[in-house]
Amino acid sequence: MNAELVLMGKRVDMVPRAHRRALVVLIYAGFAAAMTGFWFLDRWHTSAAYLILATIPINRLFLGGHYFGGLIKPFNGKPPRRSDEPPPFLLLALRVYRPGPDEREYRNDERELHQRDQAHYQAYHVLSLIVIFLWALTNFKAEIPRLIARLSIPVDMLLYGLATAAVVIAITLPQAILLWTEPDMEHEV
């Protein structure tokens, strides 16, 4: 796990667990605020897809796990692709670019592999409960309007919003679990 995050050209210390937890809370609060704002904007008709697409760069820049660049090492243990091309424009504009990792930085040791597997187990246990809940809602779709009659939200839109939230959680939850549960890191000397 990386001990610092480069954000807008500033280095943010991520050694204390409290800083990593604050980052996780900020990311999910941002997603919740965006979903709420998008509901009022267009009732998630087109904006939900943009929210899901925005999850990918947020995952890459802050969380990691699937890509190089976040706090978590890539899960697959493969080396980064060698490229002579300059870094992407967006990363340069946001000033979050770092040179690629060397051979030692991308390989996971046994402890990290165990943590990764445990985080995925916990995340997909939660996601399976969400999918079961969505399945139950779709099966009892005719009964839902009576339960939420006062909210004036169409049932299909409610299910679409819950499915969108489930996709965002599926993309980010294993990394968020790792950031949340990892104890304070030691400073390198």
Image: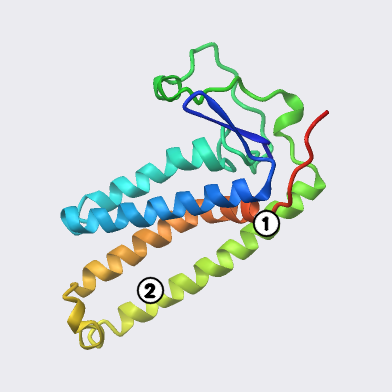
Q: Earlier in the sequence, mark 2 or mark 1?
A: 2
- Tell me where residue 134 appears, x and y as whole percent: 38, 74
Which color mode does the image show? rainbow
Residue type beneath disc 1: Thr
Q: Which residue is pictured at 80% across the width and 49% down the height? A: 111
The quarter holding residue 137 reads bottom left
Q: Which residue matches tag 2?
A: 134
Relative to 91, is 74 above or below? below
Q: Is residue 184 left or right of residue 65?
A: right
Viewer-side residue, 1 vs 88: 1
- Tell me where residue 19 appears, x and y as whole percent: 60, 46
Residue type beneath disc 2: Leu
Q: Is residue 39 left or right of residue 1?
A: left
Viewer-side residue, 6 vs 169: 6
Q: Is residue 102 left or right of residue 129?
A: right
Mark 2 neighbour class, 10 Å CA radius: few under 14, some 14 to 19, many 20 or more: some
Q: Is residue 28 left or right of residue 15?
A: left
Give the secondary structure at mark 2: helix
Single out the mark in the foreground, 2 or 1.
1
Q: Which residue is pictured at 29% across the width and 45% down the height? A: 50
Relative to 162, is 144 above or below? below
Q: Which residue matches tag 1?
A: 181
Q: Which residue is pictured at 61% across the width and 56% down the height? A: 177
The quarter holding residue 160 reads bottom left
Viewport quadrant of the C terminus: top right
- Tell me where residue 46 appears, x and y as whole percent: 21, 50
Mark 1 neighbour class, 10 Å CA radius: few under 14, some 14 to 19, many 20 or more: few
